[in-house]
Image (cartoon, coloured by chain):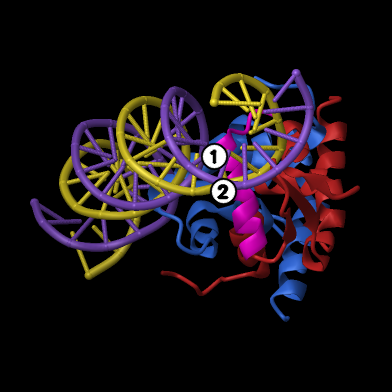
Chain colours: A blue, B red, C purple, D yellow
Amino acid sequence: MNEINFCPLDYTMNLIGTKWKPIVLFHLLEEPLRSGILQKKVPGISNKMFTQTVRELEKDGLLIRTVYPVVPPKVEYALSTRGKSLQYILESLDKWGAEDCKK
Amino acid sequence: MNEINFCPLDYTMNLIGTKWKPIVLFHLLEEPLRSGILQKKVPGISNKMFTQTVRELEKDGLLIRTVYPVVPPKVEYALSTRGKSLQYILESLDKWGAEDCKK
DNA sequence: TAACTATGTCACTTTTAAGTAAGTTATTGC
DNA sequence: GCAATAACTTACTTAAAAGTGACATAGTTA
């Protein structure tokens, strides 16, 4: 509508500006995780929202989903290069929260 | 529900993890702005959402709302100290978007 | 052969977010 | 005395996000 003052921040927010996306990405910073483990690390997320979130992140190229054809299923999620480039921001958000909630 | 893996990032996201909050805060980084000006800087926000957003940010102590008792009304918004402490993160988000959308 | 496993999908409902349009205020300038 | 102004507020509606519970899969183990 009014794009007069469009700024890159809007772009970033459209990509990761949701309740769950930064949290999911954050937990993948250290290492790839399989689906169940990752989901357990995200407090309070429902099964549906978890699937939906990782699928969108995959679609946007922020993480990579690897399916192993075994039974029961094994699916692993890892950050893509693009996802890794958010590392600094994700850590800053986490750090800010740690500092701020001390007060 | 499952608070086992609560991390500071969750705290931060609960505070500013919405579509509009980071954008509103971002535009106050340089200088305080009066209501109408600030709202025009936020692309696509409705009147209602703007009011709601700044009120929540005020409630959470991230910005300060100053009402001048004149007619027609004059209201100015400025970052609080706590809000200013987000400067680095907001700029990082903006910078990331600028870099990423070049690709 | 029946239960168990991990990772979903689907249909459905509830909750929350957001948009729209009208109304309020009190002074100034015409 | 009437319109214009800036910044809301309210009631109402619509759209989007999220939750819930049931079901699918197919090999392995009891």
- What is the quadrant of the C terminus of chain A in the image? bottom right
Residue B56 in the magenta stretch? The answer is yes
Viewer-side residue, D28 vs B61 = B61
Secondary structure at numbered mark 2: helix
Region of the chain picked out in magenta, as a range = B43-59
Mark 2 and 1 residues: CB-CB less than 8 Å, in contact? yes
Which chain hosts label 2?
B
Q: Which residue in the structure is indicated by mark 1?
A: B48
Report the residue at 87% width, 40% height from top: B95
**Dot 1 surroundings within 10 Å: few (below 14), some, or many (20 or more)?**
few
Residue C20 position, x and y percent, is 46, 23
- What is the quadrant of the N terminus of chain A in the image? top right
Q: Which mark is residue B52?
A: 2
Report the residue at 85% width, 55% height from top: B87
C-alpha gap between disc 2 and disc 1: 6 Å
Viewer-side residue, D21 vs C16 = C16
In the rendered image, which quarter is residue B83 located in?
A: bottom right
Q: Amino acid at mark 1?
A: Lys
Residue B89 position, x and y percent, is 82, 54
Q: Amino acid at mark 2?
A: Gln
Is D3 on the left or on the right of D24, as rendered?
Answer: right
Residue C29 position, x and y percent, is 78, 27
What residue occupies the far right of the structure in this picture?
Answer: B30
